[in-house]
Image: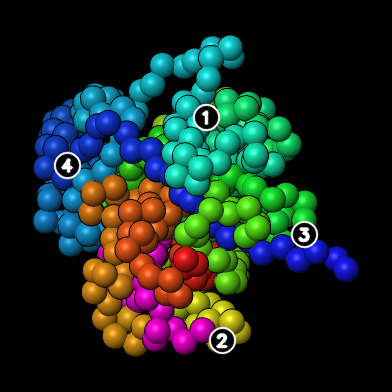
Amino acid sequence: MKPTYHPVISATGLYTPAESISNAELVESFNAFVVRHNSANSAAIEAGEMEALQPSSVEFIEKASGIKARYVMSKDSVLDPSTMEPRMAERGDDEMSIMAEIGIKAAEQALERAGRDAADVDAVLCAASNMQRPYPAMAIEIQQGLGIEGFAFDMNVACSSATFGIQTAADYVRAGNAKSVLVVSPEITSGHLNWRDRDSHFIFGDVATAVLVEDSSIAPRPHWDIVGTKLKTVFSNNIRNNFGFLNRAAPETKDAPDKLFVQEGRKVFKEVVPMVSALILEEAERLQIDPLKLRRLWLHQANAGMNRLIAQRVLGHEANDDESPTVLDTYGNTSSAGSIIAFHLNSDDLDAGDEGLICSFGAGYSVGTVFVKRHA
């Protein structure tokens, strides 16, 4: 008889940068840039050839997003009005890359929490919204740094990369191709953010997470049974980043805004909320899970308003902080890592038998759902 394998989440890990930027600090820097820009272009502005930039405010940021601070890898250069972007020294080919470094730190914590040795892991998936190079794969560098045999590869589904990675890892376990898989998401999203754009300069922060997906036969106690997963993508230009190797050499495009993160925020809100809510409810019905009885929702940390509305549609009432915890206020939007941070920091208190949902959504559009049940 063919053996049956059951994927579970054995443990998670989190790496948080040492430096954080508050909204007040960010606004001070942005508004200094606005003054400099408007002064330098005063003639063109007065002639009507250019629009003056408008200042930002703490109130505007918090009302628009719910974000109050964000962690970053390079604080001083982000806040410097003359640079306003992360500046990290380029490392040589014989040095470990920054993404691998922080990914390994998150992975080591996950392994430690599971009581697992790196030698026991069969595969590494690096699932993140931006890779710092095309090849060799970041995942393979992380694999080497951890001392793992087997295989590794990168995957990018923007803000849904981690949940797509969890399903991929779970599928490997179900098929018997691996018993232990690390899904690592190093998200240095400060690098793709246009810190000079009033409508988005406050959105992103940096972090790294790791999720250890394993067969239940070797998983520690307690762990989380993966009850079911569902993924969906629908093409949309409403969230986009046009940077790539085909346009890197064109001088006229070097500072073009579309080579960084751009979005049509209102359209995203209007289109993504119903799509995410419908997918969650459809999958819950397929799995014979009563959505009203879900103990906790660990939603993608992109926008407080979106999470509030999605949770309400799923649970049938406005969720409280216990039912749908947020890390958005202190971490900002960390792309695919957001829902994993929320799970990592807000799951140990649940009881055996409690069911919950890890859910991501973002550019693509992409949506990933991972229904889990606490196992004693």
Residue type pointed to by label 1: Ala
Disc number for residue 288: 2
Which one is closest to the eye, mark 2 or mark 1? 2
The residue under the point 65% across, 58% down is 217
Q: Which residues are magenta?
A: 288-311
In 3D space, how far apart are the residues under numbered discs 2 and 4 (Cα atoms)?
Answer: 43 Å
Residue 286 occupies quadrant: bottom right
Earlier in the chain: of badge 1 and badge 4, it is 4
In 3D space, how far apart are the residues under numbered discs 2 and 1 (Cα atoms)?
Answer: 39 Å
The residue under the point 69% across, 41% down is 122
Disc number for residue 175: 3
| Residue position marked by numbered label 4 in the rendering | 22
Residue type pointed to by label 3: Ala
Which one is closest to the eye, mark 1 or mark 3? 3
Instruction: Determine the secondary structure under disc 3.
Output: helix
Earlier in the chain: of badge 1 and badge 3, it is 1
In 3D space, how far apart are the residues under numbered discs 4 and 3 (Cα atoms)?
Answer: 46 Å
Which one is closest to the eye, mark 1 or mark 4? 1
